[in-house]
Image (tube, helix red, strand yellow):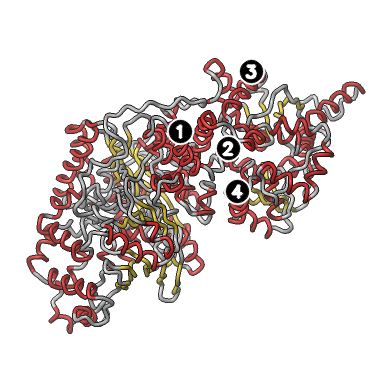
Amino acid sequence: MFRLSQNPSFANLLPSFDGDLYFDNSPEHTAQRILYATDASVYQEMPIAVALPKTVSDIKQLLRFAQQHGLGLIPRAAGTSLAGQVVGSGIVVDISKYFGKILDISADEQWVRVQPGVIRDDLNASLKPHGLLFGPETSTASRAMIGGMIGNNSCGLHSIIWGTTRNHLLEVKAVLSDGAEVTFGPLTRDQFEAKCRGETVVSPLEQRLYVQFRDWLSTPTVQQHITDGYPKPTVTRRNTGYALDALVPFFSTDTSSLAARPENKPEPTFNFAHLIAGSEGTLCFITEAKLNLLPLPPKESALVCAHFNTIRQSLEANLVALAHGCSASELVDDYILQLTKTNIEQTKNRTFVEGDPKAILMVEFFGDTSDEVAKKAADFVSALGQKELGYAYPTLFDTDTLKPWALRKAGLSIMYNIPGDDKPANVIEDTAVDVHDLPDYIDELDRMAWEQHGLKLEYSAHAGAGEIHVLPLINLKSSEGRATFRALLMDTAQLVKKYGGSLSGEHGDGRLRGECIAFMLGPENFQLCKDVKDLWDPHNTFNPGKIVNTPPMNESLRSEADRVIPQPKTVFDFSKDGGLLELAEKCSGSGDCRKTEISGGTMCPSYMATRRERDTTRGRANILRHFYSSIEKPSNHDYEAVKDVLDLCLSCKACKAECPSSVDMTRMKAEFTQQQYRETGVPLRARLVGNFTKLMSLASVAPWTYNAIYDNPALRRAANRAVGFHPDRTMPELAMVTLRKWFATRSKKAVHSGNSSGINPGPQLLVFCDEFTNYNDVQVGQKAIQLLERLGYSVTIPEHVESGRTYLSKGLVDKAKAIAIRNVTLLKDLVTDDMPLIGLEPSAILTFRDEYPVLVPDNLKSDAERIAKNVFLFEEWLARETDAGRIDRNLFTTTAQVVKVHGHCHQKALSSMIPVKKVLSLPHNYTVQLIPSGCCGMAGSFGYEAEHYDLSMQIGELVLFPAVRQAETAIISAAGTSCRHQIKDGTGRKAQHPAEILFDALL
């Protein structure tokens, strides 16, 4: 692990610092600093400290401290930068937790004032009732923050109609290097000259900024250098160096012509905010921003997903799309499309794909009516046909367009699913040229990469704006790969300059492309960029080593070159992922796990509640990558640092599906925990939770005694405290008879009496009697079995043992493996295509599908995989039977009823909520509505544990609890036993399993 050798006196900051500060060698502080050593780029550098300021005063204190000790301040928002912008050895200042307020909305004047930690999609959710939006829309918009979007001058997929962040940045409030807090906004000539005279300025530095820029940019030779050296005007995405070209027009206007200016033409203005956009936090520290807003787009939309056999064809079709007035034109190539076939979430999004195209161009049209957008789409498709471009043109409308867009946005991250050390390298991914030059440029780039470097390239994204994200596969763990990494960038820079393009369109220069700026812009312009940095930041405090004075672009990478790191020995089989370490390395850093409950989804529930980087899947993957790649003999300190970060992982499995890179944190956490137990021993509470089935079996001998204790508040609180559970958490009741005993007794009575009523001779089913249904939720099992029999099926509970879920949840993987082996051995000759195994509790039955195939030894793998294919959630199986026409809807009531459904996390990750909605709609007049909740917050024993109880309830309050409270007359459905218990404790409402609801609906 990284340790501090010497440390400035950060402790002196603490008394007056309102935010959070991490700087020492304790496990918690060490872990925090490790998490902030990387972003979404290939770089890694340990910061001396991490600060989460709460106030502007905190930021000013950090600035003074950094200048006193010669440290850099590295501003960080979502940490999704691809050029190493937020990686450095100074103090990383994360504004994402405490600087996230929307301060003011003016619907009439169409602007909003925000703090830099406001998330773009969350902002637009607040603006939607006003009929407005903030236009720039990056693929990371569900977590990208306004501060980061300003820093990179972000654009996104609708930039051809909505422009860049700079286009909509009206004002910036910031702290300058002298500590003054200043507001930069549009200035008329008179206002600008007043600033130069020292009027209305907040400090001498502010005055110097205006005077010096007037002197520089009024000079004809400087203006000519900028005109000649910067990308040509038709390149709309231009982020190379500082945006001096955006300021020059103010000075190049002939003042003598101003009097003759037409009345409707506004007077030119000067705005330093346009320079700050794209400056990557190197000039000042942003504390607020005023943004221009746009009306919401027309309600109707059509998306033509045109299929092509070559990349060039798709780029020629892009010009046709632009001529037809599209709102977006985005490319996805065959490399990404192939990878979507193996990604849980994206397999659901690729249903529009026909065959195996080399490229798909997604072209969107907006309109006021469905007929209007349908005609626009048809005219475009007709034009492609006339030019013989493309072979298929599926067209989607309205909400059906969301899935293709989700697939496109996952493009860069999904590439990290490629096994091996050759990984997608962000190095030439951000080049932009004139859109008419794009076909020739990409042809030449492709040829150069192959002929000079032996590289095949992957292409995606913003064809309509002249910027294709290009990714080569390079092994940056090798010296040879690092040399290729550098050489490819230098050769690409020459090609981009040949076409008058920009080496960075929207991702920024950072430390990745800084070395190339002198070549791209010319020595005079590059020197002016350096002078700008010196003027604004004479102490080199704000994000040093970015844009100018950057270190070599192939240094400080995540991995040490040519070092062989053995994969750790594991209980789980990680071979399909290349090993445990490689699974952790699949994290691209894109930060999909940082979205909030407003954007929806399940990943990552603890982050949604805490808003801390350490509580993201990315943070956990980073700490595991460090642990397994940096430490040969871990100490207790090292284990504790990792454990501290993994602690609030609820093992919801959402990351396995929702993370584009399919980072399975649930499995990695369990494996690490098992390894730690071998070194430090198994805690008592973990043993108790793991041995749930054994303890319930003992308690079921006298269930009334167990219930008497836990039904009594005083006794329950004492008992909970004794085992480390929270005293306010109630405990599930123990049934007076187990489900197995009930079923066996019932079957014996039927056979003995010779009356088979209730024992149906119809098609046979195997029902898995999981440990939770067997002891606590017996009524669920009883109603499910009786429902199945009423529907005409014969039910058998086969011989098997518990699922092993409780052991897995506490990291007792060795124990779970023994159970998996036992169950596969018992069931391998019973479970078939014709005799499926049906389960009621998602967390239990889905162990067969998810964990068992990677737990059992090789001699049982084929059996485990075959069983996995024939294991179904109750709802999945019933939906399949419904689709086959084998379920009679007339058996159910016709009474009208609303059913609100909360999905279990494992159900959403490994299955789907579609079957649930389908089967609960069997009663003719049942209206089924999915609650847009993520995790309920209980997560097995997590919500019982004393230190996790408050967070558990906080997670429930994000979406689930309020939705349940509002649905006063609705039936609440939840398949998970933990979910039902959490709903009861959080709202006082009783939620029911879908099987219970359907049984009660029988006529």
Work out how far the residue at label 4 is from the one at label 2, CA to CA, in angstroms. Answer: 31 Å
The residue tagged 1 is: 342
User: In the figure, residue 589 lies in which quadrant?
Assistant: top left
Q: Nearer the viewer, mark 1 or mark 4?
A: 4
- Where is residue 486 shown, x and y percent of the image? 20, 39
- Where is residue 930 shown, x and y percent of the image? 62, 50
Q: Nearer the viewer, mark 4 or mark 2?
A: 4
Work out how far the residue at label 3 is from the one at label 2, CA to CA, in angstroms. Answer: 25 Å
Q: The residue under label 4 is which amino acid type?
A: Glu
The residue tagged 4 is: 947
The residue tagged 3 is: 825
Question: CB atoms at circles 3 and 2 under 8 Å apart?
Answer: no
**For the view shown, which residue lies furthest in the right direction?**
753
The numbered mark, 4 or 2, whose residue comes first in the sequence reads 2
Residue at the (15%, 62%) spot, across then down: 531
Q: Nearer the viewer, mark 3 or mark 4?
A: 4
Near-viewer residue (820 or 261): 820
